[in-house]
Image: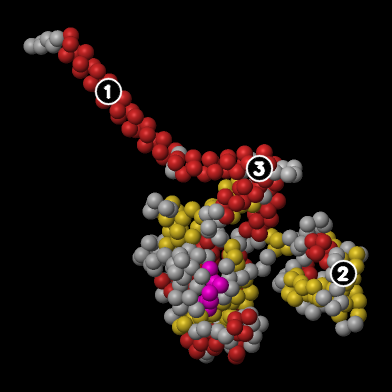
Amino acid sequence: MNRKISLGKAIALTIIAVAVTIAITMSVSMRIYDNLIKDLPGRVKMYSAISSIDDVVRKEFFGEIDEIYLNKNIARGYIEGLNDKSSFFMTADEYIEYYNREQGRVSGIGITHRLNTDTGNLYITGVAKSSPAESAGLKIGDEITKIGGDSVTATSYKELSKNLEGEKMTNVNVTYTRGGESKTVNVVIGYSLTTVSYRMIGNTAFVTITGFYENTVAQFKEVINEIRNNGATGIIFDVRNCSQGSIKYAIDVIDVLVPLATDGTKAIATAVNSDGKTIKSFPADADDVILPIVVLTNEQTSGGAELLACDLRDFKRAEIVGTTTGGVGTMQSVYQFEDGSAVVLTVAEIIPYKSDSFNKVGVKPDYDIKLTSAQSKSIGIMDESKDPHIKKALSLLPQE
């Protein structure tokens, strides 16, 4: 049976329906708008402040404004304003250098140096393993007197030393003196970075890791195979002062050492964003190294090196000797822009296999042993018999 309603009621119901529809639409639209433009009041305030500064500068500044230089430094200052050391802005050239380093490729000839103020020459203080400098025969203690045929002086060394870093050339002639004799060698610029090396201390393999890059895992696997062939009964991983490279490449190294992740997070690590959502999970495969392991850490151990120490302990594969690590447990992503510049931005916190996040708190060792200032400065060069961390590690591992 049909019921009739008055024209007035029909109009009223229509108005109510339209009002409800508009209210729902506005509510949904606002939620979408809020998600698209987060913290709109904060943005308006920031843009207003920059605009006010810009107005004053363009009216009153005595000098010419280099717009490219200005915009580059506005971008750099914005990222620095986040107060996060792991986030940073790069120009197009800086990004190319960063990208190459992430791949394990670096420019330069592979030396560190210091000006000898008495002679005006450059004093070689370090030579990278497998670098062009090492291949050319350069050694610590050599004094560089000429670069590319130009004499090195106290006033010219800064500009000339750029040629050793690949800023202008693909190879360079280096003249140096050693033991009173002078020699000139032609050195190629650019090489593959070696981040994993080892030596045997009795039956123990002592492995040093200085960074985690794309080529690190291949080097690491090669070292592990050599260690097995040498019949090692234990391994010491030295990641003291190791803070370079990427978490994802550190995870590739960890995966060589641990079995399938079946407990905890069921992954070597998970990345959780600011909303508490897991944005990336890093599972482990079935590889495993069944040897007693000790990891050496200090305050300069951070990022991927911290995760290595923490995860190996979580998987019950290692004990940790040293001091509490730096507490940088975050993951970064790279965002490149149309002009070739880029931003490395912290996007998530890293959660280890079983432990809580070590971000801002560090990884505490099982055996807390502090070094003297002199010992800390000598890490990597002092004899193992004088290194308290190595001595303790050796006491924890089988020696026969």
Residue 236: percent from left, percent from top: 54, 80
Disc 1 designates what residue?
19
**Label 3 or label 1, whichever comes before in sequence order:** 1
Q: Which residue is mark 2?
A: 153
* Rendered image quadrant of residue 231: bottom right
Q: Earlier in the sequence, mark 3 or mark 2?
A: 3
Q: In the image as oriented, which residue stretches furthest toward the front?
A: 60
Residue picked out by circle 3: 57
Q: Was residue 99 drawn as part of the magenta stretch in this picture? A: no
Q: State the image coordinates of residue 199 (x, y, percent, origin top left).
A: 63, 81
Cα distance, mark 3 to mark 2?
Answer: 41 Å
Residue range highlighted in magenta: 293-302
Q: Secondary structure at mark 3?
A: helix
Q: How is the image coloured?
A: secondary structure
Please name the residue shown 80% across and 64% down the image: 158
Q: Secondary structure at mark 1?
A: helix
Across and down, in percent, residue 166 comes to 78, 59
**In this image, 288 relative to 171: left or right?**
left
Which amino acid type corresponds to the residue marked 3 in the rendered image? Val
